[in-house]
Image: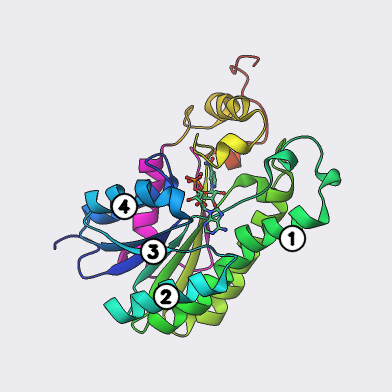
Amino acid sequence: AQGLMAGKRGLIMGLANNRSIAWGIAKSIHSQGGLIGFTYQGDALRKRVEPLAAEVGGQVFGHCDVTDKQSMDDCFGAIEKEWGSLDFVIHAIAFSDKDELTGRYVDTSEENFSKTMLISCYSLTSVAQRAEKLMTNGGSIVTLTYYGAEKVMPHYNVMGIAKAALEASVRYLAVDLGGKGIRVNAISAGPIKTLAASGIGDFRYILKWNEYNSPLKRTVTTDEVGDVGLYLCSDLSRSVTGEVHHADSGYHVVGMKAVDAPDI
Ligand code: NAD
């Protein structure tokens, strides 16, 4: 293969369908000659992930639920057996109870708080523990975050707290793994209508608001986030680690509603 990712092999976790951010990243990495392994969460997603993996010449390493240590060990064990090493990992995984992605943060239950933190934050660390062993020539670990980690966004609630902790994890992991040439970064993506996003209250309003008020006057696509993922996995970003890179049409730099934005 030729391209920026020629000779590199990596794992993409969090593919659900062709609207997933994981799919945008997979296409970009494939276009530059990277070889991709996928995992899926539960049998229902298997029949969606298998044909998509085939489209990009990828390999499927089976069911992997980040709350189930055995399934994690099985997947990373299969990768070690098949490939022996890993060059990149994309962590595109988050979950919270839909009922708590609306209304007030203060009403979050202890149970959903823990579950959200485990799936959306701790899982990056448990993935990094396993990836470290396989990244014998250095590597790149990339996760996905959102502006709701930095500022209060309506309905994002407990997920905002989890993303803030996820972004802090990126910095701690970058320091722990940097000596081995393993880089850890996050992409802070602007809002995109995916399966996970459909659980967030008033999501259409958030999309419109971003469109009218971001410097580029539009929302972002999974293909665009995919190209940022490609950059962070490739050697082009070899000096970059511990970074939260915004791919949001510049929305995060704006402090006030645009004067020409319509009322929505
Ligand atoms: P998506 O629904 O396509 O992907 C979410 C994935 O998380 C699914 O594949 C699902 O199977 C997986 N997942 C959930 N719980 C899991 C578990 N216990 N074990 C293993 N996998 C599990 O939605 P997406 O928007 O592409 O989400 C990918 C990432 O991007 C998430 O971290 C999300 O928070 C982040 N993000 C999304 C947006 C957006 O607007 N869509 C913006 C910024 C960041």
Q: Which residue is mark 4?
A: 50
Q: Which residue is mark 3?
A: 62
Residue 89, x across and y down, in percent:
41, 66
Q: Which residue is mark 2?
A: 76
Q: Is 183 left or right of 112, judged from the image as shown?
A: left
Tell me which label, 3 or 4, sits earlier in the chain. 4
Graded by Cα atoms within 10 Å as few (under 14), some (14 to 19) or many (20 or more), the crowding at tag 4 reads some
Mark 1 near mark 3, Cβ–Cβ under 8 Å? no
Query: Which dot, 1 or 4, sits closer to the camera?
Result: 4
- Which residue is the extreme one toward the right? 106
Residue type highlighted by circle 1: Ser
Graded by Cα atoms within 10 Å as few (under 14), some (14 to 19) or many (20 or more), the crowding at tag 2 reads many
- Which residue is the extreme one toward the front? 43
Residue 108, x across and y down, in percent:
81, 48
Tell me which label, 1 or 4, sits earlier in the chain. 4
Secondary-structure class at tag 3: strand
Residue 31, x across and y down, in percent:
22, 52
Residue type highlighted by circle 4: Glu
Distance from disc 3 to disc 2, alpha carbons, whole Å, reads: 10 Å
- The quadrant the N terminus occupies is bottom left
Tell me which label, 3 or 2, sits earlier in the chain. 3
Query: Which dot, 1 or 3, sits closer to the camera?
Result: 3
Tell me which label, 4 or 2, sits earlier in the chain. 4
Residue type highlighted by circle 3: Gly
| Range drawn in magenta | 221-249
Q: Which residue is mark 1?
A: 114
